[in-house]
Image: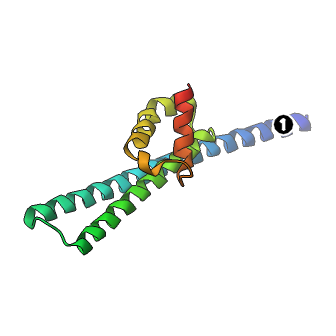
Amino acid sequence: MLAIVAVFIAYHQLKKLNKQKDIGIVMAVLETEREMNVAKKELDESALSIRKRNQVAPGMSEEETEIYKDQINIGIENLLNSIDRLAFLILKGYIPEEIWKREYRELIANTVREYEDKLGAGTYWHNIVDLHNKLIRE
């Protein structure tokens, strides 16, 4: 009788742990999506400030151009970092296939198309490339 109670308790504890793991995965995905949105917003704001600057006073100094280029590149890197983390979660199976294919397939394809120059051989963001290649094979 005691063994049955122990099995019952162990079963419920495992079930509770599994639920906590699932909640942790959802939280990781939501945090990654938040980071992508923040990075995209910052990138958009940088691009907008450049356009506004050119409308007010056309033509920038070389130094000013370099500053804006750096600002845009940092924004792109932040965006790619967050998308790469999402791709890692997908590749490791933390996000079920039926969800990520529906939700993120187009995001990955568009990212590779838009930032092809940054996602070549030896790229720092290899998870994006690996996931994109997986999508192409399927």
In the shown orientation, is residue 42 left or right of residue 54?
right
Residue at the far bottom: name it: 63
**Which of the 4 image quadrants contains residue 11?**
top right
The C terminus, quarter of image: top right
Q: Compared with residue 98, is residue 26 higher up or lower down, i.e. above or below?
A: below
Work out whether 79 lies above or below 2.
below
Residue 26, can we see it?
no
Question: Measured along the vertical axis of the image, is residue 125 above or below residue 99?
Answer: below
Q: In this orientation, which residue lies closer to the viewer: 116 or 73?
A: 116
Task: Determine the residue positioned at 80% across, 41% down.
Answer: 10
Q: Nearer the viewer, residue 61 or 78?
A: 61
Q: Secondary structure at mark 1?
A: helix
Check the image and tell me how it is coloured.
rainbow
According to the picture, the residue beneath numbered tag 1 turns out to be: 7
Q: Residues within 10 Å of mark 1 (few under 14, many from 20)?
A: few
- Between 129 and 89, the one nearer to me in the picture: 129
Q: How many marks?
A: 1
Q: Is residue 62 visible?
A: yes
The residue positioned 31% from the left and 56% from the top of the image is: 43
Instruction: Provide residue 67's location: percent of width, then percent of height.
Output: 29, 70
Which residue sits at x=41%, y=53%?
79
Quadrant of residue 35 within the rendered picture? bottom left
Residue 131 % position (x, y):
55, 38
Q: Residue at x 31, y 64 (%)?
A: 69
Horizontal side of 90 relative to 114 (left or right) equals: right
Q: Amino acid at mark 1?
A: Val
